[in-house]
Amino acid sequence: MKIALLHVAGILAVPALLLLGIAAGSEWCKNLFRAGDKTVAAFFGWDGFHTVSAQCGASTRFLPQAVGSLIDLAFGEGHCEQAARKEGLLA
């Protein structure tokens, strides 16, 4: 049980540290976070060329919209729709 919790903590620590770097203005952290974001999108069956936010913002399916709502809570209302427009998934 302890080992599983340590693994989860380690996995969550990487994006948390990258987000702190982004908040501090690090372009390197921003690029790493974006690459990881696109990798996660590919892992969940999307094309891997767009971020999870953009995919959720363009989706009409329930689960991606629900995930998009959580992302919007974290990054601000309309984040996913703006990402979808910026990345060319919505007109």
Image (tube, rainbow, N blue to C red):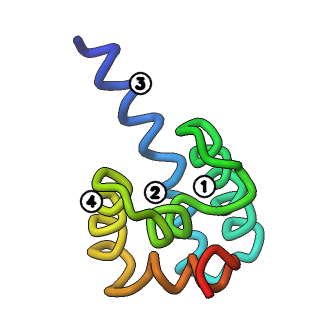
Give how far across and how far down residue 66 sits, in percent.
27, 59
Residue type at mark 2 is: Ala
Marks 2 and 1, how far apart in space? Answer: 13 Å
Residue 4: x, y in percent? 32, 17
| Labels 3 and 4: the sequence-earlier one | 3
Q: Which quadrant of the figure has residue 70? A: bottom left
User: Is there CB contact under 8 Å for labels 4 and 2?
Assistant: no
Of the numbered discs in the image, which one, if any, rests on residue 5?
none
Tell me the element at label 4. helix
Task: Work out whether residue 79 or residue 11 is closer to the camera in this orientation and state it.
Answer: 79
User: Comparing marks 2 and 1, which lies closer to the viewer?
Assistant: 1
Q: Quadrant of the N terminus?
A: top left
Q: CA distance from mark 1 to mark 3?
A: 19 Å
Q: Position of residue 41 (x, y in %)?
A: 58, 48
Q: Are marks 3 and 4 in contact (CB under 8 Å)?
A: no
Which residue, given by chain and number where applicable, does mark 2 sit on?
16
**Mark 1, mark 3: which one is toward the viewer?**
1
Residue 91, compared with residue 44, is above or below; it is: below
